Amino acid sequence: MTPNGSPVSIARFLLTQVAIGFVLAGAFVAWIIIQNVHGLGALITNTDLGWFAAGLLWFFAGSTFSAAQIGFSIMMHADDEDQRPAQREPRIMDLKPIPVRSRSSGSR
């Protein structure tokens, strides 16, 4: 799905990528809870507000995964004309050293 420039298609493209990112984040959080990574699974399942912690973990992981998914998707949809190097002549610069005076602060 490539955005063609209209606001509706761009919004649809972004929302699709956000949904994919949050699904991946849900799988990631489920894996963390099932595998009990660093005791987080036991902490989430054995406390009163474990559902709240899992929700926050899912939301912030979803925000991160969504941003990465959008970036990845945009990079993968580059046009062929964008990949051609610019046709410019290289600049030839006449670089000359400039003498600079420095003062010694004494013995070291």
Image (tube, rainbow, N blue to C red):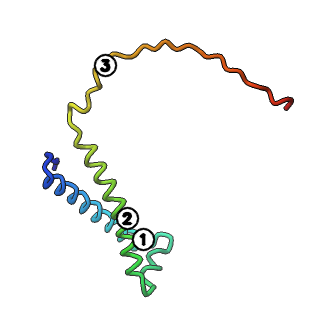
**Mark closer to the chain start, 3 or 1:** 1
**Mark closer to the chain start, 2 or 3:** 2
Relative to 88, is 35 on the left or the right? right
Q: CA distance from mark 2 to mark 3?
A: 43 Å
Q: Secondary structure at mark 3?
A: loop
Image x and y of residue 91, in percent: 39, 16
* Front in this rendered view, residue 5 or 17: 5
Of the two numbered discs 2 and 1 in the rendering, the one whose residue sits closer to the viewer = 2
The quadrant holding residue 51 is: bottom left
Mark 2 residue crowding within 10 angstroms, few (<14) / some (14–19) / many (20+): some
Of the two numbered discs 3 and 1 in the rendering, the one whose residue sits closer to the viewer = 3
Do the residues under discs 2 and 1 have CB atoms within 8 angstroms? no
Q: Secondary structure at mark 1?
A: helix
The quadrant holding residue 86 is: top left
Q: Which residue is tagged 2?
A: 61
Q: Which residue is tagged 3?
A: 88
**Mark closer to the chain start, 2 or 1:** 1
- Residue at the image point whose x is 65% and y is 16% from the top: 99
Relative to 42, is 104 on the left or the right? right
Image x and y of residue 65, in percent: 34, 59
Q: Which residue is tagged 1?
A: 35
User: Mark 1 belongs to which amino acid?
Assistant: Gln
Q: CA distance from mark 3 to mark 1?
A: 55 Å
- Residue at the image point whose x is 43% and y is 79% from the top: 44
- Residue at the image point whose x is 77% and y is 25% from the top: 103
User: Mark 2 belongs to which amino acid?
Assistant: Ala
Relative to 2, is 48 on the left or the right? right
Quadrant occupied by the C terminus: top right
